[in-house]
Amino acid sequence: MSRFLYYLIFMNMLAVIMTPVPRLLLLRSGDGALSAILLSIVAGVLFTYITVSFFLQFPGQDFIQLLKKHTSNWVRIPVTLFFAFMWFVAGIITLVMTVFLLITFLTPEMSIYTITLSILITVFFGVLLKSKSVLFTLEIVFIIMIPLFVLMFFKLFTSSELDLDQVRLAITHINTLPDYTSFTSSTFMFMGSANLIIYNKYFKEKHHISKGALVAITCLGIFLIINAYLIPIGYSGFDKVHQLMFPWTSSVDAVRMKFGFIERVVFIFMFLFVTISFISMIVHWHVAYKLVLSVFRLKILQVQQQNYTPFLIAFVFCVIGMWITIQATQYDLYHYSMYYYNILPIFVAIFFLTMLAIKRGASS
Amino acid sequence: MTTDNSKQEMPIFMKTITKILPASFDVLHVPITFEGAQAQLLFLKTVVDGATLQQTIIKPFYELADEHKFAAYIKGLPNRIDIPPTDDLITMLTSGFVLIYVEDTYSLLEIRRLGNTQQNETFVETTIHGSQLALSEDLETNISIIRQHYHQSSLYVESMQLKDKSNMSIAILYDEDLVNIDVLRRVKERLDSLDEPLIQSSADLAVRLTRRRFNLFPTSIITERPDRIIYNITGGKIVILADNSPFGIVLPVIFFDYMVSMEENYHTYFISLYNTLLGWFGLMMCLVLPGLYVAITAYSPEILRTELTLTIAGSRIGVPYPSFIEAIIMILFVELLTEASVRLPKSINAAATTVGGLILGTAATEASLASNILIMVVAIVAISTFVIPINELSFVVRFLRLFLLVFTALFGMVGLISGMLLIILHMTNLDSFGEPYLRIAWRSKRSEKKVNQE
């Protein structure tokens, strides 16, 4: 497996803090969240395995090319648009959540327009880059962030504020039946490999998916889902944690760094996760943009050799993102993103069916 | 001063050439006769080396005193070439060739007066342990310097002339076994398609080699150090040398090349690692610090621990305007100071820096027009800029920190993160002659230098 694939998968796992997933899980902590999480780990690793081994059969080809080659238009266009919608909404959820977090914790007196604009300017340029450049940026951001990750986990797991009894209490609820929304939302964490539908174009070498890779993905997944689910419980208590609007960030604010320039470690984490959410938005919207571009390429926007359709698409993305961010309330965010996670199984079903169709088409 | 020696008729071809050449004072037509032997010379006095001409042409003529023997002698000279087409011939005459007519045949001899063949001392990229001599200003001397540093038969030197008004001769050097053929092809295509009226130095050429017009980041390194040139040639890169310019152009580059100081090769592992980290720390400091100051004072003071926040707020007491204005004034002031110290003659330089830096800095805080902490920030920023090993990059960084400052002033802490990402995104999207500009190459140091394709 190419190292960039790991980055894509890990990015999705890390960005989960900047999505409503932690709260959706904690809301159901008494009714089957933990068993759903365990189930989702199995499902997620299986999804990763199937997706990656599918794309390994077609090195250097993205999903758009495969669809064009092996299926007819009436399959290709709806599927592409549906996928574009899914990726676009994934980006929107991260955007709205990031803006809400920033306005709550970092810059409360700034206007929501300004904050959204500051994010969208960079995302606009990021979306329009070459796919290869997006991957390079992803890698560089990861390298820069590694020391912060180490610091973060060290601080989180060693702090005296962490109450392990509460964690044990949460674990006792493992025997309840898994909950549907918890299952789908925590599976979302493992779906980073689905980004291959565009980025597979740059994975030209013949790779194979090794057991070690799967184990690494599983371990990191478990580690990060514990971080997203059990850490807030450990800091805020099992009974009250679901009352917090941003449970992860609020809970982690308990950690202090005694001798640092920055006393409240949560700001370092904010810095880390805001950066991750930027890059996650860019990756998701880039996929959505490429998918839309494969369906629409307006001839009117052709000026000499330059076609301005990409700019239009990215601009429309940003405008919709801006509009939704301003309209949405915190309740809307959690409410509608729940629907999004609930339809993820439909996406997976369609995804696998088209894979099957492509495979049929390729072998015949 | 074309002599009309009536004894000797000027041959027709030479006549036409003389007509094309302007009638300036340094165009010389010299017929020489001795005991029945005859020869005619045509050259430009100011570009031809008189002593060599005397030694190798005129003296033998009188010693041999025989036209046939002299013609044979001329044919045997190593710097003789056959007559090229007229247009080229004219250019060659203006660059130091001598047209000689003897025994009904024409020959062209290169007797060029060489420019400054002295090796300069390193001036831009100084090191403590590395070589103290830089390139000279003469193309052939420079090629010979490189050849003497790099004894490999695979070192390939191609020379060509630019088509602009300066007709500058340039040399492309690379190791045949290591060079990336695609990049070489792109560079040559670009050189052929150059359409500039005048190119004067290698820095000029380096800028023109990039296709995009509005650039911030340079896509090649200008260096004066022979050891850096060799280091890059062994890494499979291409070096372009230009005549009359003491700098070489290294292509293609990745961003990390700008952070390599030659000093690092001359120290033990940990020392050079420490120096590298120091360089990167300096780079980050001078990029981020002004923005960070504005973000912390104006937008999110709660990030820092309480005592530190109070100290900063305390030092800003009495400053009448927002921290953005304060920061931008001081940064611009330091920029002026840096520019001034570059432009000023060396003797006044120190005085200007002292007056500007020390006195104005103190006065600004005492008049409470800037906080003490900001003066510190600005000083750290100014110093860190000089840590960056390649000068071209520090110019870019000086521009970028203003950009980050404005971005932060508009959007606060998020703006700083956003701006940094924007810079990274821009760099990853750039390419230098087809090679990605910023990307991490996970290979050993030796092969990392190589221009790999992925």
Image: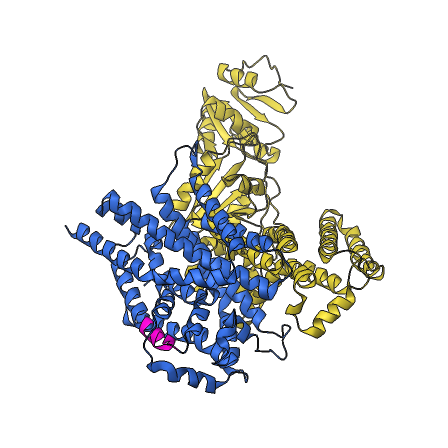
> Residue A36 in magenta?
yes
Left or right of A44 in this view: A97:
right
Q: Is residue B148 visible?
A: no
Across and down, in percent, residue B287 comes to 62, 58
Viewer-proximal residue among B1 and B75: B1
Magenta region, residue range? A31-40
What hue does chain B carry in this figure? Answer: yellow
A291, B33: nearer the viewer: A291
Q: Position of residue B429 (x, y in %)?
A: 47, 49
Chain A as rendered: colour: blue
Above or below for B49 versus B441: above
A295 w.r.t. B267: above or below: above
Question: In which quadrant of the rendered image does the C terminus of chain B lie?
Answer: bottom left
Q: Quadrant of the N terminus of chain B?
A: top right
A84 left or right of B128 in image: left
Where B103 sits versus B327, above or below?
above
Q: Compared with residue B412, is residue A128 higher up or lower down, i.e. above or below?
A: above
